């Protein structure tokens, strides 16, 4: 085992304990000795991302890609990370990972996720179907496959995928919000409202999720819950979100009348598209 292998092993141990600061320092110190090592750069970028150092992480992932790595795991992680910022170098990195490691789930689902956001939905589903076969219990695969299906308008199958993701990651509000939004498209009002409220409670800082939950709850007649959600939204809203919160609040104050119309004609369609295209 090389020195770098040992450092990576120690950094992973820190990460598994949730101590990303220790992992980041260890990797940064080792990088001074081997500044062009793509594995160090990749995992340093991951640590910086986990610490909320987004700009620094992006620069580190860019450095990683610039070393022209061949390890498909590194290509997939770094490529996916820079894809989140529309970096044109993401596509060749992700494509190379998928081609050279067709049996590596992260290589297939990360490339599929990229293709879906580029609108190449049949190609995306080919990659995501392969990833699902390789890793049927990976929540990333379920979320990304659900997203591609929803973008294609196949909301019933998408709902199944998002429900699988919810089951696999019950403490993550993101797939619950996506599930609720596709259930709205299917006009399944009560389960949609349930999923949106549960997702909003798990994502307390997400003002948009609180508004969706408030309107869905009001539309279903859960006015106490609607008032709770809109209060949460008021606390978190900034900028343009405040106008939407005020409009939703007025609707709920009138006993929820008009909540379903506001939700389905104005709020939910844009929210679904926006969240399907987001890199969470």
Image: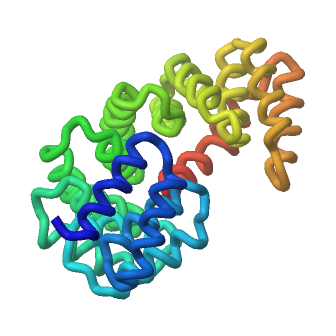
Instruction: State left or right for residue 173 relative to residue 5.
Output: right
Q: x and y percent of residue 268 in the render?
A: 62, 41
Q: Nearer the viewer, residue 44 or 234?
A: 44
Q: Is residue 63 above or below residue 166?
A: below
Q: Nearer the viewer, residue 100 or 2?
A: 2
Q: Nearer the viewer, residue 91 or 46?
A: 46
Q: Is residue 10 above or below residue 204?
A: below
- Which quadrant would residue 196 be assigned to in this image? top right
Q: Residue visible at 34% across and 64% down?
A: 77
Q: How are the residues colored?
A: rainbow
Q: Quadrant of the N terminus?
A: bottom left
Visible residue check, residue 149: no
Instruction: State left or right for residue 31 relative to residue 207.
Output: left
Visible residue check, residue 13: yes
Q: Residue visible at 65% across and 16% down?
A: 220
Q: Is residue 220 above or below residue 82?
A: above
């Amino acid at each position: 085992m090389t020195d770098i292998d040992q450092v990576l092993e120690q950094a992973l141990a820190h990460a598994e304990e949730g101590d990303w600061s220790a992992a980041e320092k260890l990797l940064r110190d080792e990088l001074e000795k081997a500044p062009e090592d793509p594995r160090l750069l990749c995992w340093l970028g991951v640590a910086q991302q986990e610490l909320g150092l987004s700009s620094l992480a992006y620069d580190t992932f860019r450095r990683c890609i610039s070393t022209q790595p061949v390890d498909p795991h590194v290509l997939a992680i770094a490529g996916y990370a820079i894809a989140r910022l529309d970096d044109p170098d993401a596509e060749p990195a992700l494509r190379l990972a998928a081609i050279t490691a067709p049996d590596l789930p992260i290589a297939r689902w990360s490339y599929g996720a990229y293709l879906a956001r580029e609108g190449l939905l049949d190609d995306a589903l080919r990659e995501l179907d392969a990833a699902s076969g390789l890793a049927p219990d990976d929540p990333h695969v379920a979320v990304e496959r659900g997203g591609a299906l929803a973008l294609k308008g196949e909301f019933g199958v998408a709902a199944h995928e998002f429900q699988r993701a919810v089951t696999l990651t019950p403490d993550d509000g993101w797939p619950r919000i996506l599930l609720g939004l596709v259930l709205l498209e299917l006009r399944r009002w009560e389960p949609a409202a349930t999923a949106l409220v549960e997702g909003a409670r798990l994502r307390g800082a997400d003002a948009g999720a609180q508004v969706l939950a408030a309107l869905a709850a009001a539309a279903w007649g859960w006015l106490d819950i609607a008032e709770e959600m809109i209060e949460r939204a008021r606390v978190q809203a900034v900028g343009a979100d405040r106008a939407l919160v005020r409009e939703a609040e007025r609707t709920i104050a009138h006993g929820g009348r008009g909540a379903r119309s506001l939700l389905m004609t104005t709020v939910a369609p844009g929210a679904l598209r926006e969240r399907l295209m987001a890199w969470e």
